[in-house]
Every structure is written in C-alpha cells, then in structure tokens.
C-alpha cells in the first residue's frame, strides 16, 4: 500500500458565518483536502450544507473538496455537489438501494466515489463495489454531529476493510478513511488498523495550539502508527 497519510478536516465545527476564511485557514494549516458534512435532516437528525454554500467556499482555497453525503437521496443530490466543486462524493451504503449503480453514476459525473459504513454496517456491504470506489469510509461515530466520542470497537472493522482492499489488489488505488472522534490520541488506533485518511473536526478546531499544530500532531501520530502496524 503506497497511498499517503492524509489529514482532512470536517468543516462542521467552523464558524458558518466565515466559511471562506475557514477554508483559507485550513489550507494554510496544511490539510490535504476538506470534507463537507452534508446532512439532510432525514438520514441524520441534522441539517447542514447545500451545494451553493460549498460553491461559495470553493473559490477561497485550492485544496480538493469532498462531500460526505449523509442524505437519504444521494442519487438526486449527487450532481449538484459535483457542480459545486466537490471532486469526491461519499455516499452511505445504508442510503443506497442500488449502491453499485449510484457509485458508477458518480464516476460518470466526473467525480471519484467513496462509500461510507455506519458503525453497525458490516464490511461485507462493500465487498462487491471496491472496483467502483477510490475510498471506503468507516464511521467511528454514529453520523449526525461533531464532538462525539471515538468508537474504538470499529478498529477490527477498519482492519477488515484494509484486508479486503489489499486482497483485491487495490492497496494503491483505494483509500481507507475514518471519521468521528479522531484526535491526536485516538488516531493511532485507527491508523494502525489501516486507515490512511483521517477526518477530524473538533480535534482540529479546538486544539490549544491552533489548526496548524493540530494538523501536524495528528499527521505525525497517524504516520507513526500506520508505519508501525
Ligand atoms: C458525523 C460527522 C463528524 C465530523 C467529525 O456525522 O461526520 O464525524 O465529521 O467530527 P469530530 O471530529 O468532531 O468527531
């Protein structure tokens, strides 16, 4: 597996009245990409960013955007988020009646596709779509809100997904992302289990040393753990 460790913020804890500044600050802090937690109030009990909000932020930085679509109707919403400037769309396996078709459609829109698994969803749910994605997201909280505690019992599932990716010969093509409760202290467990893309919200925005120190610390801890595994 040669894919790099990537640190990506969730914009969820940012000041929504200053999102242009938030993405500029995140880029300056050294993040590799930015994740937008899109919530529809149906799939999860929260409501966040429409495509126009993301489009407005797009011109304020140059790092890639990905949309984490925590929505009941990803097939309806997907294209709007590609047009808004997201180069990767992540859909939840639990929200897709025809996951294989949804992922193929996202690729046909010119974006890369990711698939997310809620904590109770087994890794086997994505066994037959690994050829259609460039990333698998293993949720380490139940989606809907930032600031929740990391669910360490997800680590065997992270390892299982990593093994599936490697067994399919896709270790150089498919990232493994984790999202939820990731911090300088919890990141080692996720990275040593095989995660190479780490999403952090609260741990970045509430770090006493500021964004850059947070990114640096989480990246260092993730890299050390991933290499030692
Ligand atoms: C849950 C969200 C959060 C967010 C990260 O739906 O996806 O996991 O990205 O929030 P923290 O890092 O504060 O747990």
Image: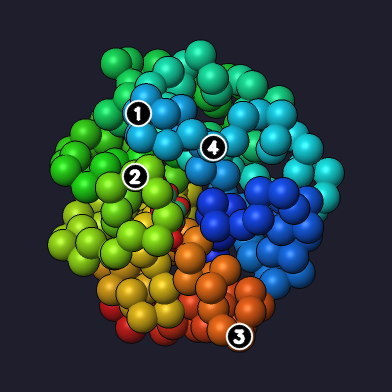
Q: Earlier in the sequence, mark 1 or mark 3?
A: 1
Query: What is the spatial separation of the Cα atoms under label 1 and label 3, in whole angstroms?
Result: 35 Å
Residue at the spot of label 1: 43
Residue 195 as seen in the image, left or right of residue 220: left
Q: Earlier in the sequence, mark 2 or mark 1?
A: 1
Residue 2 as seen in the image, left or right of residue 34: left
Report crowding for label 1: few under 14, some 14 to 19, many 20 or more residues within 10 A (C-alpha): some
Q: Quick one: 24 or 208, which is closer to the camera?
A: 208
Q: Which of the 4 image quadrants contains residue 176?
A: bottom left
Q: Report the number of discs.
A: 4
Q: Earlier in the sequence, mark 3 or mark 2?
A: 2
Q: Quick one: 196 or 55, which is closer to the camera?
A: 55
Tag on residue 143? 2
**Residue at disc 1, secondary structure:** loop
**Residue at disc 2, secondary structure:** loop
Q: Are marks 1 and 3 in contact (CB under 8 Å)?
A: no
Give percent across and percent down for residue 86. 65, 37
Query: What is the spatial separation of the Cα atoms under label 4 and label 2, in whole angstroms?
Result: 13 Å
Q: Which residue in the rendered view is the most extreme toward the right?
A: 59
Looking at the figure, which quarter contains the N terminus? bottom left
Looking at the figure, which quarter contains the C terminus? bottom left
């Amino acid at each position: 597996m040669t894919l790099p460790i990537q640190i990506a913020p969730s914009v969820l804890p940012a000041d929504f009245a200053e999102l242009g500044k938030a993405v500029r600050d995140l880029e300056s802090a050294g993040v590799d990409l930015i994740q937008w937690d899109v919530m529809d109030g149906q799939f999860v009990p929260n409501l966040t960013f429409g495509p126009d909000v993301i489009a407005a932020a797009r011109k304020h930085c140059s790092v890639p955007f990905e949309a984490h679509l925590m929505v009941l109707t990803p097939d309806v919403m997907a294209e709007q988020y590609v047009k808004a400037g997201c180069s990767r769309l992540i859909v939840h396996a639990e929200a897709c009646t025809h996951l294989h078709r949804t992922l193929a459609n996202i690729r046909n829109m010119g974006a890369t596709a990711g698939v997310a698994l809620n904590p109770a969803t087994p890794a086997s749910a994505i066994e037959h779509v690994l050829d259609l994605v460039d990333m698998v997201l293993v949720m380490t909280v139940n989606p809907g809100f930032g600031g929740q505690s990391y669910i360490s019992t997800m680590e065997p599932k992270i390892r299982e997904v990593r093994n599936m990716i490697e067994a399919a010969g896709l270790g150089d093509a498919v990232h493994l992302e984790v999202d939820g409760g990731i911090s300088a202290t919890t990141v080692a467990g996720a990275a040593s289990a095989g995660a190479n893309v780490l999403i952090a919200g609260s741990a970045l925005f509430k770090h006493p040393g500021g964004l850059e120190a947070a990114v640096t610390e989480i990246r260092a801890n993730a890299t050390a753990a991933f290499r030692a595994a």
